Amino acid sequence: MQTLKGNFEPLSSLDWSDSNPCNWEQIKCSKDNRVTRIQVGGKNLKGSLPQTLNNLTELETIEFQNNDLTGSLPSFSGLTQLQTLLLSNNNFTSIPDDFFDGMVSLQTVILDYNSFNAWQIPENLKNASKLQVFSATNTNLNGKIPDFIDTFTGLITLRLALNSLEGGIPDSFSGSLVQNLWLNGQKSTNKLNGTIEVLQNMTQLTEVWLHGNSFSGHLPDFSGLIQLQNLSLRDNSLTGVVPLSLLDLKSLKVVNLTKNMLQGPMPKFDDSVVVDIDDVNSFCLQDPGVECDVRVNMLLTVIGSMGYPRIFAEKWKGNNPCNLWLGITCSSNGDITVVNFKGMGIAGTVSSSFSLIKSLQRLILADNNFTGVIPHELKELPNLVEIDVSNNLLYGQIPVFRENVIVKSDGNVDMGKDGPSGVTQAPPSHGPRGGNRRTGSGSSGDGVVVGWIIGSVCAVMLAGLLGFCVYKVKKDRDNNPVNNQSTVVIHPRNPGPDNDGVKITIAGSNANNGSRELNNRTHSGPSDIHTIEAGNMVISIQVLRDVTNNFSHANILGRGGFGTVYKGELHDGTKIAVKRMESGVLTEKGLDEFRSEISVLTKVRHRHLVALLGYCLDGNERLLVFEYMPQGTLSRFLFHFEAEKLKPLDWTKRLIIALDVARGVEYLHGLAQQSFIHRDLKPSNILLGDDLRAKVADFGLVRLAPDDKASIATQLAGTFGYLAPEYAVTGRVTTKIDVFSFGVILMELITGRKALEETQPEDSVHLVQWFRKMQTNKETFITKAIDPQLHLNLDEADKASLTTVAELAGHCCAREPYQRPDMSHAVNVLSSLTDLWKPSEIPDPDDIYGIDLDMPLPQVVMKWKAMEGKSGFDQSGCSETTQSSMFGDRSGCAKNTQSSMASLAFEIHDTMASGDPRIGSDKKNDTFLYKILDAYNDQAGKRGFSIRTKNMLTGKWTLVNREVSKFNSLVNKTKAMGGENDGDLMTRIEILYRAREKSDFKHKSAWNLLKGKHKWNNPESTNARRNRHRVTNSEPELFGDDELPRPASLHRIANRRRSSNSTASSGSNPQMFQEMIQQQYELDRKEKMERIDREVNSRVELNYSKKVAEDLKVLQISTDEMNPIDAAIINAKKDRIRALYGPNN
């Protein structure tokens, strides 16, 4: 005890001054003065535990939790009386192998939040048969969950979250009494996986946290878990239908199923249950409790017998199986006629529920791993003409189908037997199929005998041949170093008719006629099997060598500090870029770092980030396979365009490239699942496609941003000229170092100069310094600083936007990090310049999307999602205009290009503005708006939703159409005038004029009127539609009651019209009447518009004055006595205000 006292400091919180430890505070002793309890938790103690602590053999309780103790834990072996051990929330570094030896009385162990070296639950723990609580959350625990956990008959709490466990939940958990089970958030490559069926037999469970793993398969039966209160299964790969047994649990309080692949109807839980279920799942409808289409239910029942394979959860979307569902073909009237699951790697049994699909004509299940028998119910299908179950693992007798049904059953070695023989048959070949027959013509017994004889002879011959082949292959492999390496195989993720993805697998390989098998082998380097999902191709390491001519110098696309990039073209024409990392002896640590890099790359997916397609470990070499960007780097077009005979980029293209880069980096910083910092942003790491749209590349330096968004880099990475000052000097890493680099790129886009120009005079070598100096004189900046290649094509609007971008570049390159904007701010500035959200013409949504905007908004969204990627918005024949970006009217294609997401956003604007009851009054809690936000998150990398639009969707920035209700009033009053008189005509003219000049009519009924669909023909609808304006919150409410056309004026004109008509019949001039109408109309229009303009101007001036007053108050705030953080925030606000008003205001 004196040694323990000597190891601790400070002791001010404890009274341990007495010479007898039994008198010390928080220490308990037995009657014979043996220490039985040490309870010093939460005393802020520092130090370590003595290695002789287990000499206190009578210890029953040890509590050292919530201190700052360090070092290795001593062995507690021999503490046979110890019942309670609390060591959580310290900084212990390791736990000895014999730590639990002899602890036969142990009941509670809590080790949470200690940074132990990698360790596993030791075998000797099973001697603690009385264990009730075992908690080791975030302790670097790895390996598998041991099978002996079930020996703890009294265990009620098991918490192993936030570790690096792998494998599945042991079957031995079945029947255990565990109530609290935490296995969530495993950090290992494969995480915890397998099924969770064992849960259905753990009937005492009250809390289950399995989220953040790789569990798959269907949800189990929960009917026996009558005490379950909290169930968290999010972020897994679970499939199948949510069972009714879960919905019926009376005890359930919280359930989280989001980010899985669950199918069928969206479940409707009791109102008392807190539910999180919306995101990612593959429910047929998004309305809780609404049943799926009967065809969907039949197909889900079918795949239920197969264990709900993941391939169908990925491919079967929506409530219409005839809408491009994988393996499903329908007739013109929507009946399912063909089910083709050929070659999809499906296991399970052939479902008898196929018999429910009465319209089925062809059933193709060949080349899978089906077991069991062919159900006799299938012979009752009235329209069946073909069934193909060849090359599976089926047994039993083939049902007697109708005579006209073709049955294919070859390749099932046990077909005709009463059960499986246990013989493993070879994988299905891809050669010609045989064995087609029509039922009704059975084979004779002689044929069976002959078949057995021939089969036996062939088996003997095959055995001899196989022995020779094994010898030959082994000899060749030993003599061929290429074949003795780890190899990469890219094969279809979903083999079958509609492949759109691949798995890239690293494994031992034999180059044997193109076939690949995983082999057990021994070599000096580390090996493993890795799988990631990527694009649509089939490739191997040998193919990579072939397509790059064995990494020929002629195929080099570029070199960098981390490797060389080679161009390759696959046999199907797909071009790839293969990055060959610098080779060297690949240690276990180097392999782990490479895997970590791959883990980062696979998480980052965005349309403005170069996509990773695969990777390879080949001995000590590391290879990354990326999508190919045909136009190369941005630096080619900025600095080498003359040497490479390229057309220099005009300002429009440069601005769009800047926006693309900003969006990609913005996604890295905050819109991805985690926050990342690039650290080497520069033009040579920005790649261009054929349409000159940009993607950010080279994630070799990507660093995971810490929670506080700042850390210290131990090794400087990046390129001089683009390094932020604080990063270059101190190594401080924040997202603001990328903002600085982005600012330098903006300067390069504006000036055409490199970040470092050694050929320039000394005061102009560094672009940032020179640019700042040029910005001090705004009058000469355009003429002296910008790229000479831009001067010829700049109009006034271009010059204005260029000036704005130059100011943005200056802010991005501010010396202090807090003075730089976030990337989201840069996106807002650049996107407003490209005018993405103000198209010059809005096509009729009914014509373009086939969407009826009168249907409920959730159905609009579903239909819109279904249309994404199918419309030809960028097929107008304009090579310089892309789907996601318009540049005002400067592109000739701007009027023909329309983002479907913008159309959806406009519809939401209208619905919000018109007080539609489908939108709740509290937008933050509105389910539909958050579904749209989910669409934003899913599509941010594909369609370019701006932050402005995101803010609009959350109610922070709303486009308000204030005229909708007033317009309806106008329409009603117009109808009351009789429909055919001149007053009706004048009202319509007034409406059209105001819509053209001042309105923002996007409402359905308004557009129907203006397009002539409401009541009248409308010759002015095109102009009215093209001249829509935004109406912001600060603008006046137009079309008040006093703004309606004055009835007296209308009736006066109408009377003149009638008088003129009667006079015209007696020979008077009808043209005079038209002139009178026009004169009166012009007078009325001028008077009303002047009054409206005066009101608008007064409101704008008032709002501007208020804003100026608020900004002046901020500028007057003193920061002298503030803490540094608050002062930095206020100073940043001041800088933004000064930048907004300019130095002279």
Image: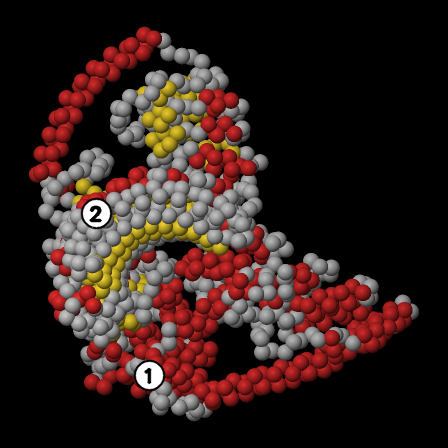
Identify the residue at image location x=72%, y=72%.
990
The x and y percentages for residue 360 are 50, 29
Q: Nearer the viewer, mark 1 or mark 2?
A: 2
The x and y percentages for residue 53 are 14, 59
Q: As drawn, is 538 to the left or to the right of 266?
A: left
Residue 313 in sight: no
Q: As drawn, is 1086 to the left or to the right of 1066?
A: left
Residue 675 in sight: yes
List the single residue furthest toward the top. 446
What amino acid type is highlighted by mark number 1? Answer: Pro
List the single residue furthest toward the front. 31
- When asked about the image quadrant of residue 515, the answer is top left
Secondary structure under tag 2 reads loop
Locate the C terminus by quadrant: bottom left
The x and y percentages for residue 853 are 61, 56
Identify the residue at image location x=24%, y=73%.
13
Q: In this view, does 346 lie above or below 9?
A: above
Badge 2 crowding class, 10 Å Cα cut-off, few under 14, some 14 to 19, many 20 or more, is: many
The x and y percentages for residue 703 are 26, 65
- Label placed on residue 1124: 1
What amino acid type is highlighted by mark number 2? Answer: Val
